[in-house]
Amino acid sequence: MTVAETPAHLAEGAARTITDHIRRTLARRQRCVLALTGGSTPAATYRNLARMPVPWERVHIIQTDDHLTEAGDGPSWRTVVEHLLEPAAVPAENRHPMPVGTRLDPREAAQAYGHLLGTLLTDGAPDVVVAGLGEDGHTASLFHGDPALDTARWVAVTRPYQNTTRMTLTLPVLSGAGLRLVLATGRGKAAAVARLLGGDDPSLTAVRTVLGDDGHLLVDETAAAGPYGAGGETAAAGPYAVGDVTAAAGPYGAGGETTAAGPYAAGDVTAAAGPYGAGGETAAGPHGTARPAPR
């Protein structure tokens, strides 16, 4: 876990981390695929990312999830468009929104998106996943108890949750990305962060799976302080904390980078090795998990 002093510091650091990973990926192959979520916290990261020197003609954007909607595009896609795709002038042919318009059969639409991903993804996983953490512990649109958590398909349609049905990438896809960032800021996320770092809450199974052993949980000081503020239980001793995680110096620390094991450190093994590890691209993916056929 890395704790940034403010949401603005978190967004800037996350954007630099994504940019570095894009560059390393494109040094090995022609295309890099980013799977992006919606929401206010990722939006700030996208605004920073749009200002980075990225060869966007070689970067493809897919979605982690979105709401089924009567409109053509879902609210999460509109966030990505407004804060990243338009400011960065990402080519239209590199933009791949989920087909969430309710004029389509949702399950057929999910299957079609899975086939599209089969043409884009290497070994069934994007290169980068940017996800959030809901107050109830969900990530992407993977909610505790939903059958989408257990499917081998790449794309699933959820049961209605808070009166909304959603389309989402599934755990085999999300957990296989070479760089996986889960972002959480603000007091509203503090309880979820504390529960996540407690390690035994089943409602956080999805986000724990996405993070795996080498994903990056990025939080601001407020979200890291625990549900009762700085005087209560903090996340510093949780299973994703490495060493003394502190935000006093901001996300880059006095030396220009954060805690050595965090996602902004020059010694980040995950980013240095690329999404498939130092041994190159393998069919098993970065965690040794067999990838399902696109469907």
Image (tube, rainbow, N blue to C red):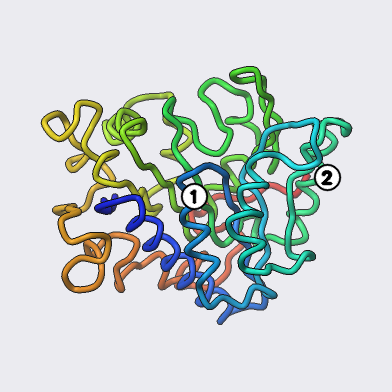
Category of crowding for the residue at label 1, using alpha-carbon neighbours closer than 10 angstroms: few (below 14), some (14–19), many (at least 20): many
Could you tell me how far apart the alpha carbons at marks 1 and 2 are, in whole angstroms?
A: 26 Å
Foreground tag (1 vs 2): 1
Q: Residue furthest left?
A: 231
Secondary element under disc 1, as helix, strand or loop, is helix
Residue plotted at (73% across, 50% down): 97
Callout 1 amino acid: Pro
> Earlier along the polypeptide chain: callout 1 or callout 2?
1
Secondary element under disc 2, as helix, strand or loop, is helix
Q: Would you name the residue on which mark 2 appears?
A: 112
Seen from the viewer's position, the closer of residues 80 and 233 is 80
> Residue 276 placed where, x, y %?
52, 65
Seen from the viewer's position, the closer of residues 275 and 236 is 236
Residue plotted at (77% across, 37% down): 100
**Taking 97 as reference, is 190 above or below it?**
above
Which quadrant holds residue 188?
top left
Q: Residue furthest bottom?
A: 27
Seen from the viewer's position, the closer of residues 284 and 106 is 106
Q: Would you name the residue on which mark 1 appears?
A: 42
> Residue 93 placed where, x, y %?
79, 65
Question: Mark on residue 269?
Answer: none
Residue plotted at (47% across, 63% down): 48
**Taking 37 as reference, is 187 above or below it?**
above
> Residue 74 placed where, x, y %?
71, 39
